[in-house]
Image (tube, grey):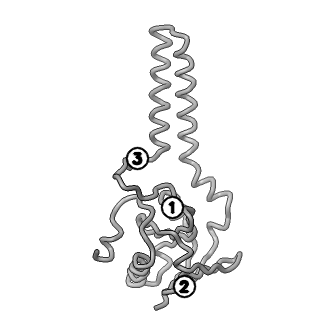
Amino acid sequence: MEIAFSGALTLDEFTQGMKLNTRPVVQQEKSRLDTWLLVVVAGSLMTVIGVLMVIFTELQWSVYLFLAGLFAALIGSRMRKTPQELWKRNPGYREQREGVINDEGVVVTTPAGSSRLAWSDLSGFGEYKDVVVLFQDDEFEVILSQRFFQSEAEWEQFKTLVAQKLVCSHKVQGNFQAFIGN
């Protein structure tokens, strides 16, 4: 069986792939909050407490709490922009890609060249919304969108083949196994 694909990623699809890249599967269920959100909330809370302490208690160390909170909030907001900045800096993410997936692996061709990956070269996969990412050593290697496939049936065949050949190593939400009937 050979399944062909062709298309260029959108910023939204790239962002979905980035979300998977930062969420390896762990044994215990973890919070689904993004790290950037936690940093922004903690930093904002520290800033507010610092301001209130300066106003009401005049403790000098409260200025340091205020500055640390401001710094954390700025860092957190900067973290949120990282996928968009990567997208802008690297035009390769936006290039047209095409290829085939079969029992031996994946062949991807872009204007920069062709890449052949055997299933044994890949360490796992992840799925989020309408994107599947094939990983090699915890870095995403291939991001494929449902739009790249000619039909829903081919998309389902692709996901079934991936689930047979690789372990689900990254997860944001949902259960990939539900799509293949396990």
- Cα–Cα span, label 2 and label 3: 35 Å
- Label 2: how many residues lie within 10 Å, few (<14), some (14-19) or many (20+)? some
Q: Is residue 46 left or right of residue 92?
A: left
Residue at point 52%, 21% (across, down): 65
The disc at residue 12 is 1
User: Is 52 drawn above or below residue 34 in the view shown?
Assistant: above
- Of the 4 image quadrants, the one containing the C terminus is bottom left
- Cα–Cα span, label 3 and label 1: 19 Å
- Identify which amino acid the numbered label 1 is placed on: Asp
- Label 1: how many residues lie within 10 Å, few (<14), some (14-19) or many (20+)? few
Towards the viewer: 135 or 37: 135
Q: Position of residue 133 (x, y in %)?
A: 50, 68
Q: Which badge, 2 or 3, comes first in the chain's sequence?
A: 3
Q: Which badge, 3 or 1, comes first in the chain's sequence?
A: 1
The disc at residue 100 is 2
Q: Which badge, 2 or 1, comes first in the chain's sequence?
A: 1
* Tag 3 residue: 33
- Identify which amino acid the numbered label 2 is placed on: Val
